[in-house]
Image (tube, rainbow, N blue to C red):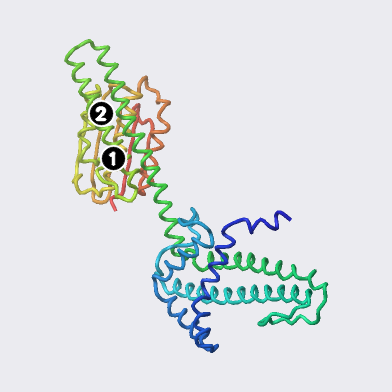
Amino acid sequence: MVRMLGPFARAVTYTRWLHLCMAIVWPAMWLFVDEAWWTVGTATVLLGLAGLVPAMRVVEGFQARLLLTGRRNGSDRAEIVLTPSATWGDRGRLVVWLQARLFLGTVASHLCVQLLLLAVDLVSTALGGERAGGAWLSVGGHHRWHALLAPLPLVLAAVVVVGSGHLITAIALRLLGPSPAERLAALEERTEQLLERTRIARELHDSIGHALTVAVVQAGAARAAGDPAFTDRALGAIEEAGRAALEDLERVLGVLRESEKPVSGRPTLADAGRLLESARVSGAKVDAEVTGPVETVPGPVSREGYRILQESLTNVLRHAGAVPVRVRVHVAEDTLVLAIRNPLPGGTPGSGRGSGLRGIRERAALLGGRARTGPADGDWQVHAELPLS
């Protein structure tokens, strides 16, 4: 019994009924003034024309979201959209929605009024009074047992109120919800957001990891060297790496705070000199050669190439230490080639490169390229080929 009365304890039950009643207010007033049933047909035609107005979808969507679901801002599923009609399909669904709302509101309101009149007639005839006018169903005679039937029309009216509310909500979710094109656009936007978060996580890993690696290597080398001049250079390298990491961190946090703004200011291969100099100051003997027009490399390719080079040098400093490193950056007609080689410590592959190398391969695959990592002729090699188109 308590479960059956549950819907009447929720405000949305009454706001749904209000939503239905609002649909028939102006046709009912028009019918009251004109007293001609042809006005119902005119109201239907006017609603059809109103449904062709793109902004009408926003108005109806806001009413439905607020009164039918009880959520002003909607839910994560975006059940009812608040955007103007963009296609004729959207307009057609809105026209059907307006007609369905008018029809269901008319039927439900008339049923409730007739059921309430029937309940009044049953009570009146049970007490020996006369029937109220306007009821479709006639109650004959004057019998006291009519009073026992009086609650039944009230129960049926309550069922009509709750049932029509559920039905109009289901229709709204169907007709005012996102179209297939809008669902696809929302899915693509969500996918882009996930990819952006993944990319940000990679950048933080690469940037912060590189700065910490440089700091650890430089601090250890400065303490072991005991040379004031070398210590000054080491502190300068640590400071420069820390500043670069702070800049990356601030930019990433800015992207997270203002997700609608485009990403800008990310380092590209034009800034590779900073990475190479940082590795040299850390003790690595870097032999770098850049051929081809690096400045013409497309932005996404150049930025990912920078991160691949950064992660490769970080791995060298972290796992091999101050060893000779050969860096080759070649820009061909349709491909960017990155090749980084360094001697393996003790002639055996390092065991701690898993996550960094996986990130390098993922970056290359994301751009439709490929990357090979592993030992080659006694050296450790990272070889990445990224398409420029």
Q: How many marks?
A: 2
Horizontal arrangement in the rendering, residue 111 relative to residue 94 (left or right): right
**Image-based side of 248 in relation to 74, left or right:** left
Residue drawn at x 29%, y 28% is 211
In which quadrant is the N terminus drawn?
bottom right
Please name the amino acid that badge 2 sits on. Ala
* Foreground pick, 299 / 156: 156
Q: Of the residues shown, which amino acid type is indicated by label 1?
A: Arg
Please give the label number shown on residue 350: none
Residue mark closest to the camera, 1 vs 2: 1
Rendered residue at 51%/75% (across/down): 25
Q: Residue at x 25, y 40 (%)?
A: 267
Q: CA distance from mark 1 to mark 2?
A: 15 Å
Q: Is residue 46 above or below residue 228?
A: below
The residue to which callout 1 is attached is 251
In which image quadrant can residue 314 be found? top left
